[in-house]
């Protein structure tokens, strides 16, 4: 058997491993010096603490509570604790709730202190490839950590559930590497990176989890060096980890740093590619020479020699011989990937086959076709059934032009859906085919396109009602959909990045529905919906979403002829756009103010100044032909208003002389 993970070690020491499982574990120990040393080290840490510590976290029943959280089910259990799926009623979202075993850290009192310190450290980490920590606390004598719920497999399961090309495996691991690099920049060392501590979300994004053994690498400016050293938990953590991936210095009990995570990362990627754990004939950290490992066994994937050399450097015995930092390792991998892509594109026919034969120990199977259009992505949102329901709704309105409007609207939505599929394919190809976009950038573009799909869903639902005011405004509602191509724009990606949880997605969908209601003339309903979404966005600090919400509020209030309150909404939109550093949103806010000041409030001088502000914001925003046209229209309105204010009153309109 392969070297067991930390859960198996902990279960064995706690007496929970019985029967054939215990016999198999003991048989493995007989032939593995490394695992015997790991077991002894863990016994020295866990066994003394277990005598005085309370029992580990119990499995919570469905429907029970842990603090404010409602337990839904059990996701898993391991050497460090139990993980439940739970519901947070205050924020209306599901979370992963981890109950940590106190004896793993020397008792509950010490654990509470440790977790409070860890929470402060992890609060500094915000990255797409790191699972965020929401909450840390204590309930019923047990310590819990609430974190983002990622409904996907671990990287360990993902890489084995079906055959994967070596490039796909490397791309996924590089996402994890970027998360580790960001944590290292914040002064955090993971200390137990392995494929089981990385999750693959439904969007294909990898998130590194379980920094339960992490250590703040540096003291804060307000913290004395000796205090930071005492907080490093070396006594209880230095020898805790998963044996197959532990760096040599971690085995020795020596201080660990980011280069130790680099070793664990390379060991995990080596295992994923070669099909077996990284092993040398001699244990190099005892002074033996380090011969190069044998080629990958028949059960593993073949991979290029350049990648083999990169991993061997990261697996060096001495930390100083490894890459200086994780970004250097990432750069080495990406250079190799891009160089190989260039070679493959330049070569052809027999020359390509010969090059592959020289570079790889054996050829990969034919790669799958990447980035194909997937019609199911819009299933139930806009498909044949949705179009039929729209036509039926329009027909039921009994308007004489309903059939013509339905055909025009369906054609507009079909064209939009085609553009959406094209942008989805282009986003995938930029990363998976051409390699000039990172996995993190792909995740942001995909999230933006998912928001556009949610906007389509809201528009289609409204159109399918077939209500008379909706049918009359149907073409405007369809053409006012946010363009998928905007998801290449950093400003649109920033708005999608305001929040990727359910609350943020619901907020963006609500704002888009409110915008459609404005088009249909339902101003009061639009104002209520957008104002509610904007209030939540302001509380959560989602500036781009707040700017969009207040823009819709301003439009709705103008439709209600409430010019004074519309002016306040436009300014709220402007301030939120400035906070988000979104020049396009700022331009739109200034244009809305200019039109309001020119037409509704009859303040032409202020309208012209608003146009000047809009020009400045537009100059920063870059090229946008449609926005530029709107700017010129607003300038014309301001000039017309100014001219009207200077024109003499016609004689027929003057009061009769007394």
Image (cartoon, rainbow, N blue to C red):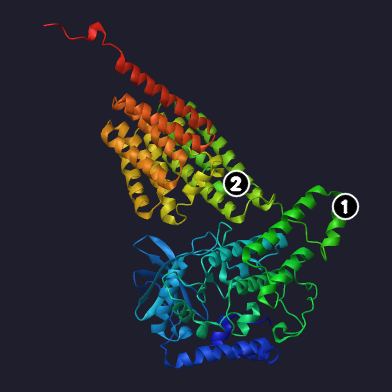
For label 1, the SS is helix
Work out whether 147 lies above or below 601: below
Nearest to the observer: residue 331 or residue 229 = 229
379 left or right, relative to 591: right
128 left or right, relative to 288: left
Q: Earlier in the sequence, mark 2 or mark 1?
A: 1
| Residue name at image x 57 percent, y 66 percent | 180
| Residue name at image x 78 percent, y 72 percent | 296
Report how far apart the C-alphas of labels 2 and 1 lie in the structure.
Answer: 33 Å
Work out whether 598 lies above or below 115: above
Observer able to see residue 124: yes
| Residue name at image x 64 percent, y 78 percent | 247
Q: Which residue is mark 2?
A: 424
Observer able to see residue 467: no
Is label 2 or label 1 in front? 1
Estimate the x, y position of residue 130 in percent, counting from the top left: 53, 64
For label 2, the SS is helix
Q: Within 10 angstroms of label 2, few (less than 14), some, or many (20 or more) residues?
A: many
Work out whether 393 lies above or below 60: above
Q: Within 10 angstroms of label 1, few (less than 14), some, or many (20 or more) residues?
A: few
Estimate the x, y position of residue 225 in percent, counting from the top left: 47, 77
Q: Which residue is mark 1?
A: 351
Q: Quadrant of the C terminus?
A: top left
Q: Quadrant of residue 331?
A: bottom right
Q: Quadrant of the N terminus?
A: bottom right
Estimate the x, y position of residue 633 in percent, counting from the top left: 44, 24
| Residue name at image x 59 percent, y 73 percent | 193
Q: Residue furthest left?
A: 658
Nearest to the observer: residue 143 or residue 253 = 253
């Amino acid at each position: 058997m392969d070297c067991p993970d930390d859960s198996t070690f902990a279960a064995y020491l706690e007496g929970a491993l019985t029967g054939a499982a215990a016999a198999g574990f003991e048989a493995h120990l007989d032939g593995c010096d490394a695992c015997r040393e790991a077991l002894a080290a863990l016994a020295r840490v866990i066994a003394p603490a277990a005598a005085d510590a309370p029992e580990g976290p119990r499995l919570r029943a469905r429907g029970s509570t842990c603090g404010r959280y409602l337990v839904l089910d059990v996701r898993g259990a391991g050497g460090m604790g139990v993980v439940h799926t739970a519901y947070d009623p205050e924020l209306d979202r599901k979370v992963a709730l981890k109950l940590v075993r106190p004896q793993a850290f020397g008792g509950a009192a010490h654990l509470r202190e440790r977790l409070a310190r860890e929470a402060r450290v992890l609060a500094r980490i915000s990255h797409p490839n790191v699972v965020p920590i929401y909450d840390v606390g204590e309930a019923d004598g047990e310590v819990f950590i609430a974190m983002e719920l990622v409904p996907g497999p671990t990287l360990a399961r993902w890489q084995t559930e079906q055959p994967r090309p070596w490039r796909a495996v490397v791309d996924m691991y590089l996402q994890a590497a970027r998360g580790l690099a960001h944590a290292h920049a914040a002064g955090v060392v993971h200390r137990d990176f392995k494929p089981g501590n990385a999750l693959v979300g439904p969007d294909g994004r990898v998130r590194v989890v379980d920094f339960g053994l992490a250590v703040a690498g540096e003291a804060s400016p307000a913290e004395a060096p000796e205090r930071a050293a005492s907080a490093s938990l070396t006594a209880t953590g230095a020898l805790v980890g998963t044996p197959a991936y532990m760096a040599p210095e971690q085995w020795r009990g020596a201080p660990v740093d980011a280069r130790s995570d680099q070793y664990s990362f390379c060991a995990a990627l080596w295992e994923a590619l070669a099909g077996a754990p990284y092993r040398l004939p001699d244990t190099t950290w005892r002074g033996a020479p380090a011969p190069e490992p044998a080629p990958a066994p028949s059960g593993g994937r073949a991979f290029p020699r350049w990648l083999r050399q990169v991993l061997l450097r990261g697996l060096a015995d001495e930390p100083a011989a490894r890459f200086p930092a994780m970004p250097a390792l990432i750069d080495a991998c990406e250079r190799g990937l891009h160089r190989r892509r260039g070679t493959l594109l330049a070569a052809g026919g027999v020359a390509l086959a010969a090059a592959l034969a020289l570079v790889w120990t054996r050829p990969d199977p034919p790669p799958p076709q990447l980035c194909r259009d997937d019609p199911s992505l819009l299933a139930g949102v806009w498909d044949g059934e949705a179009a039929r329901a729209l036509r039926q709704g329009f027909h039921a309105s009994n308007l004489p032009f309903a059939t013509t409007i339905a055909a025009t609207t369906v054609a507009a939505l079909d064209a939009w859906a085609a553009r959406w599929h094209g942008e989805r394919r282009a986003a995938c190809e930029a990363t998976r085919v051409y390699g000039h976009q990172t996995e993190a950038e792909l995740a942001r573009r995909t999230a933006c396109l998912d928001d556009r799909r949610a906007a389509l869903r809201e528009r289609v639902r409204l159109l399918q009602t077939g209500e008379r005011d909706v049918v009359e405004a149907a073409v405007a509602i369809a053409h006012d959909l946010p363009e998928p191509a905007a998801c290449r724009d950093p400003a649109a990606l920033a708005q999608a990045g305001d929040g990727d949880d359910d609350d943020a997605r619901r907020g963006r969908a609500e704002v888009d529905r409110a915008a459609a209601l404005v088009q249909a003339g339902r101003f009061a309903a639009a104002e209520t919906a957008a104002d509610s979404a904007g209030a939540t966005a302001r509380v959560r600090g989602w500036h781009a979403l707040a700017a969009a919400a207040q823009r819709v509020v301003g439009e709705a209030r103008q439709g209600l002829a409430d010019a004074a309150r519309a002016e306040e909404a436009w300014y709220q939109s402007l301030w939120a756009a400035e906070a988000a550093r979104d020049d396009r949103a700022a331009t739109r806010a200034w244009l809305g103010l200019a039109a309001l000041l020119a037409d509704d409030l009859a303040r032409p001088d202020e309208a012209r100044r608003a146009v000047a502000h809009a020009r400045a914001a537009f100059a920063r925003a870059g090229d946008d032909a449609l926005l530029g046209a709107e700017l010129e229209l607003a300038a014309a309105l301001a000039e017309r208003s100014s001219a009207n204010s200077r024109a003499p009153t016609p004689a027929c309109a003057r009061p009769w002389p007394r």
